[in-house]
């Protein structure tokens, strides 16, 4: 029997009639695969968990059910926190090829590029889903730019922003946090660092059998690079010390937001995730 998760992750293709013509709508959770855009935005400052969240998202994309998701990844979407950046570019390029932007290198250029992608979606009647794996300062800049170009768009209905971390909210600039809460469909979900709170818990210091779970050479390469970079920068030069990762485990807690968007809330933890998506 298929698990509850596998049954619930997709709302089956539904035929409906509009003006006498049959149309097909395919949705995964809240996300419309035909029309919507998923923005995955990683602060990479100063916790290395973003690196492993990138690898976990790439793992999700390798599944045939999610391989056609219209997405764009953005690095360097940090807020007002102090501390050094964790350079993720090598990993981003391996995981996402050219489907990425670098807000750390040039914030305004990244806003302009992502805005073009987002406007195409909005003009084609799709919605924008933002998984803020970090702070919301970049999201605020992006939405202001979209509003300038498309003042007729109701962003509080068409742009959905998902945040899972109290700390991420605390180190978003207050003006940016207030702005996104007013100007988007803002969702604060339970923290992805904990198990059993209503969203998957993906911080797992005891999970040390990753190599037993993976058999795809591309995913193995992505995960190995993510782990190597995590070990290189974890706790170094004043960066945040992620104890789950230093103990040999994994932390891709920021993926909880993507799971919520795609209707994968029933995933329990890291072990469950890899049982579903690594083979």
Image (spheres, grey):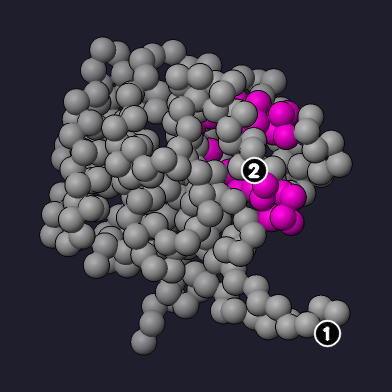
Q: Which residues are magenta?
A: 120-146
Q: Quadrant of the C terminus?
A: bottom left
Residue at x-position 65% and y-position 80%: 14
Residue at x-position 34% and y-position 38%: 93
Q: Which of the two residues, 182 or 189, is positioned nearer the viewer here?
A: 182
Name the residue tied to disc 1.
Answer: 20
Residue at x-position 31% and y-position 18%: 239
**Is residue 187 something one can see in this rendering?**
no
CA neighbours of label 2 inside 10 A, class few (<14), some (14 to 19), many (20+): many
Q: Earlier in the sequence, mark 2 or mark 1?
A: 1
> Dividing the picture into quarters, in which one does residue 205 lie?
top left
Tell me: residue 54, above or below residue 105. Answer: below
Q: Secondary structure at mark 1?
A: loop
Tell me: residue 22, above or below residue 137. Answer: below
Residue 86 x, y percent position in the rendering:
33, 23
Residue at x-position 60% and y-position 28%: 111
Name the residue tied to disc 2.
Answer: 118
**Is residue 123 something one can see in this rendering?**
yes
> Dividing the picture into quarters, in which one does residue 226 lie?
top left
- Give the alpha-carbon distance from disc 2 to disc 1, as whole Å: 30 Å
Residue 267 shown left or right of residue 171 in the figure: left
CA neighbours of label 1 inside 10 A, class few (<14), some (14 to 19), many (20+): few
Residue 126 in magenta stretch: yes
């Amino acid at each position: 029997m298929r698990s509850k998760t596998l049954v619930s992750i997709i709302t089956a293709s539904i035929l409906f009639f509009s003006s006498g013509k049959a149309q097909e709508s395919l949705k995964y959770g809240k996300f419309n695969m035909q029309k919507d855009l998923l923005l995955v935005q990683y602060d990479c400052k100063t916790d290395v968990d973003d690196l492993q969240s990138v690898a976990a998202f790439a793992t999700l994309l390798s599944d045939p059910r999610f391989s056609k998701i219209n997405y764009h990844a953005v690095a360097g979407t940090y807020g007002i926190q102090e501390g050094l950046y964790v350079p993720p570019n090598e990993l981003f390029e391996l995981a996402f090829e050219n489907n990425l932007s670098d807000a750390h290198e040039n914030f305004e250029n990244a806003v302009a590029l992502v805005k073009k992608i987002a406007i195409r979606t909005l003009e084609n009647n799709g919605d924008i889903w933002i998984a803020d794996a970090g702070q919301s300062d970049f999201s605020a800049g992006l939405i202001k730019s979209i509003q300038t170009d498309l003042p007729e768009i109701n962003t509080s209905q068409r742009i959905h922003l998902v945040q899972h971390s109290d700390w991420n909210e605390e180190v978003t600039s207050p003006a940016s946090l207030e702005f996104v809460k007013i100007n988007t469909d803002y969702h604060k979900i339970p923290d992805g660092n904990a198990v059993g709170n209503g969203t998957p818990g993906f911080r797992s210091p005891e999970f040390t059998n990753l190599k037993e779970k993976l058999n795809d050479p591309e995913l193995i390469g992505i995960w190995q690079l993510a782990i190597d970079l995590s070990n290189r920068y974890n706790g170094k030069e004043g960066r945040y010390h992620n104890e789950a990762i230093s103990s040999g485990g994994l932390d891709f807690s920021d993926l909880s937001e993507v799971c919520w968007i795609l209707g994968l809330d029933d995933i329990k933890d890291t072990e469950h995730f890899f049982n579903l998506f690594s083979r």
